[in-house]
Image: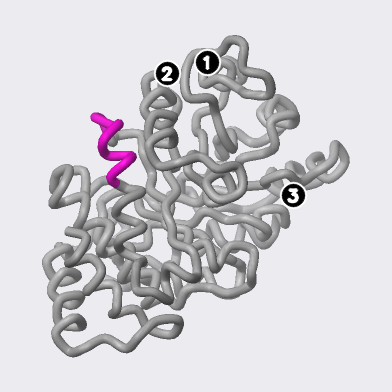
Amino acid sequence: MAAAASSLASQFMGLRREAPPSTELFVQTVQFKLRHSSTRCPNGRVIAMAGTGKFFVGGNWKCNGTMDSVTKLVADLNDAKLENDVDVVVAPPYIYLDKVKQSLTDLIEISAQNSWVGKGGAFTGEISAEQLIDLGCKWVILGHSERRHIIGEDDQFIGKKAAYALSQNLKVIACIGEKLEEREAGKTFDVCFQQLKAFADSISDWTNVVIAYEPVWAIGTGKVATPQQAQEVHAAVRDWLKKHVSAEVASFTRIIYGGSVNGSNCAELAKQEDIDGFLVGGASLKGPEFATIVNSVTSKKVAA
């Protein structure tokens, strides 16, 4: 698998080497196999998605905000007109979780940005899944690159976190993604599959899991993977799930993109067949722009 992934990773464009024709043919074949007949909506529109899951947009507020700015952001989100066929989730800092939960529209669910690997106890500074559930959280973000590369969490530890969160009925946004030097070395698939395997080794039920592909080189840098670059990784991730978990899981698991997503680039990214939504950083702190990203679901819909 590692050798095959290394050879396939050379297909990436822009920040990587040009692909030989055989590699390009492989990607086209994978995408063709994953493609199934589009889902027809009752109103006659067709959803151009490879997966069967509902479009998903998460907002990761990270370590940002004050009482005043959070109050304003919540007010902006409550006033926003959002498409109703999208699962929308926001992840405030821990200290604002209850405030946001009590004041935000029920149309938007609440996520934590992290949780402890097991039951709470003498773990200073940590937050348990049980505590998050008690607050009314429905989701938690695990495996974000900032937790991996700044805090130092490894793949297996993150996988165990995901398993415990799911055991407590906390849904998981499972993040994967490569650093710039890994992409330039043609190791994008190696890295993503290794991180994905750590989740798969610990998770038995994927019903409440969303996978977020977030290339580290694109997070907060202003650099965005092209729609084609993002699509090919998403298609490869879906194919990995099909081969190593099941075809059913590969179909219903949402695979969302994160990495400098904003109101200007979301529509083109959303048009890609295997991009099932977004995990948004900085733009999620701006209510109107976040609403634009949520409503990019309309780019998925084409005339029947």
Residues marked 2 and 3 touching at CB (< 8 Å): no
Q: CA distance from mark 2 to mark 1?
A: 7 Å
The answer to which of marks 2 and 1 sits earlier in the sequence is 1
**Which of these two is toward me, 167 or 187?**
187
Residue found at x 52% / y 53%? 279
Name the amino acid type tagged 2: Gln
Q: Position of residue 251 (x, y in %)?
A: 21, 50
Name the amino acid type tagged 1: Glu
Q: Quadrant of residue 273?
A: bottom left
Residue at the disc numbered 1: 130
Nearer the viewer's eye, disc 1 or disc 3?
1
Residue 47 shows in this picture: no
Q: Look at the image and say whether residue 268 sits in the magenta stretch.
A: no
User: Magenta stretch?
Assistant: 197-205
40 sits left or right of 110 in the view: left
Of the numbered discs in the image, which one, if any, rests on residue 76?
3
Residues marked 2 and 1 touching at CB (< 8 Å): yes
Q: Position of residue 80 (x, y in %)?
A: 66, 52
Q: Look at the image and say whether residue 200 sits in the magenta stretch.
A: yes
Q: Quadrant of the C terminus?
A: bottom left
Q: Residues within 10 Å of mark 2 (few under 14, many from 20)?
A: some
Name the amino acid type tagged 3: Asp
